[in-house]
C-alpha cells in the first residue's frame, strides 16, 4: 500500500504503551505520531493532526475510552486495547475496528491492523470510483461539478475555500478540512494549514516549498514529515 497509516496510542499504562510501540515499529505501514496518557489531551491532538487510527484504552481517568470514541471524528478508526472483556460488545456497537484484550501477542495485533488497511482500501476504492465532486457556490442550492483530476490545489482562506483547477478557480463557503475529507486520500495531501495539493500535479519540491502549475506553495513544519513520507512511497 502507498499510504502510511498515521496512528496514536491513548493509554495511561506505561507497560501497555511500550508494548504497542514495539509492535508498531515492526509494521512498515504504520507511523506512530504520538503516545498520550491523558484522554483530554488526546482530543486536542486528534483535532489538530491528520490521524487514521487510535489504539485506545478504555479505563482511564477524566474520560473513558468509550466516551472518547464517541467524540472523535468518524473517519478515524479505533482499536480498543483493554484488560476488561466486558466492554467488547459496546465497542462493536461503536463500530470499533477491533478489540484487543490485554495481554495480546504480535500476531493478534497484526490481524487487527490489517483490518484497518482493508477498511482504508475499501474507502479509497469507493472514493476513486467517483471521479468528481459537487462544490457549493453562491446561493442556497447552487452547486458546481468539479472533476477531481482537474483540481491542482485547494486554498483555505478566512471565510471560504478556493479550488484552483486547470483553467479555472472555484470559490466555496466551506472549510478546508471538510473539502479534504471528501477527496481520495491517495490523490491529495495537506502541506500547510492553508493548502491541500494534488499529488498528480506536483512539479517540484524543496524542503520548504512545492511547485504546482508554476505556483510556489509553502510547506508547513507540522505537515513536512508526512508529506515527504507520502512522496517517498511514490518514488521510482
Image (cartoon, grey):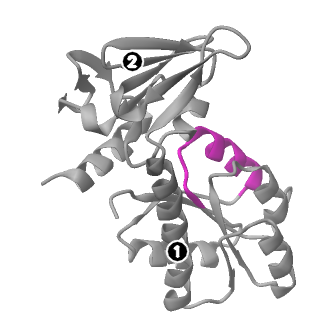
**Label of residue 164 in the image:** 2
Q: Is residue 33 visible?
A: no
Q: Residue furthest left?
A: 236
Instruction: For the residues labelled 1 and 2, say whether their Cβ atoms are less than 8 Å apart.
Output: no
Q: What is the total number of numbered labels drawn onto the structure image?
A: 2
Residue 177 pos. (x, y %)? 58, 32
Is disc 2 placed on a helix, strand or loop? strand
Between 107 and 201, the one nearer to me in the picture: 201
Q: Main secondary structure of the magenta part?
A: helix
Residue range in magenta is 38-53
> Which quarter of the image is occupied by the C terminus?
bottom left
Residue 14 pos. (x, y %)? 63, 72
Q: Is residue 217 left or right of residue 146?
A: left
Q: Residue furthest top?
A: 138
Is disc 1 placed on a helix, strand or loop? helix
Residue 199 pos. (x, y %)? 30, 38
* Comes first in the chain, label 1 or label 2: 1
Q: Residue at x 25, y 15 (%)?
A: 215
In the image, residue 215 above or below residue 208: above
Q: Quadrant of residue 213?
A: top left
Residue at numbered disc 1: 113
Q: Is residue 222 left or right of residue 59?
A: left
In the image, residue 112 above or below residue 208: below
Query: Is residue 44 a member of the stretch shown in magenta?
Result: yes
Q: Residue at x 26, y 55 (%)?
A: 233
In the image, residue 30 above or below residue 170: below
> Which quarter of the image is occupied by the N terminus?
bottom left
Q: Is residue 40 left or right of residue 170?
A: right
Q: Which-is-in-front pick, marks 1 and 2?
A: 2
Residue 140 pos. (x, y %)? 74, 13
Amino acid at each position: 500500500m502507498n499510504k502510511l497509516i498515521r496512528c496514536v496510542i491513548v493509554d495511561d499504562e506505561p507497560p501497555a504503551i511500550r508494548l504497542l510501540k514495539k509492535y508498531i515499529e515492526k509494521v512498515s505501514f504504520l507511523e506512530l505520531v504520538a503516545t498520550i496518557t491523558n484522554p483530554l489531551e488526546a482530543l486536542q491532538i486528534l483535532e489538530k493532526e491528520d490521524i487514521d487510527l487510535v489504539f485506545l484504552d478504555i479505563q482511564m481517568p477524566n474520560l473513558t475510552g468509550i466516551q472518547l470514541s464517541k467524540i472523535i471524528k468518524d473517519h478515524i478508526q479505533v482499536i480498543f486495547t483493554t484488560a476488561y472483556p466486558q466492554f467488547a460488545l459496546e465497542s462493536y456497537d461503536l463500530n470499533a475496528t477491533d478489540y484487543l484484550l490485554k495481554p495480546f501477542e504480535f500476531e493478534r495485533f497484526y490481524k487487527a491492523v490489517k483490518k484497518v488497511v482493508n477498511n482504508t482500501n475499501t474507502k479509497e476504492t469507493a472514493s476513486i470510483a467517483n471521479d468528481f465532486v459537487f462544490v457549493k457556490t453562491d446561493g442556497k442550492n447552487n452547486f458546481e461539478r468539479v472533476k477531481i483530476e482537474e483540481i491542482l490545489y485547494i486554498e483555505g482562506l478566512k471565510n471560504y475555500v478556493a479550488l484552483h483547477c486547470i483553467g479555472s478557480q472555484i470559490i466555496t463557503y466551506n472549510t478546508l478540512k471538510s473539502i479534504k475529507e471528501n477527496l481520495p486520500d491517495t490523490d491529495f495531501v495537506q502541506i500547510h494549514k492553508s493548502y491541500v495539493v494534488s499529488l498528480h500535479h506536483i512539479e517540484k519540491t524543496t524542503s520548504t516549498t512545492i511547485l504546482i502549475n508554476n505556483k510556489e506553495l509553502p510547506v508547513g513544519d507540522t505537515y513536512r514529515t508526512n508529506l515527504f513520507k507520502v512522496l517517498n512511497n511514490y518514488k521510482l
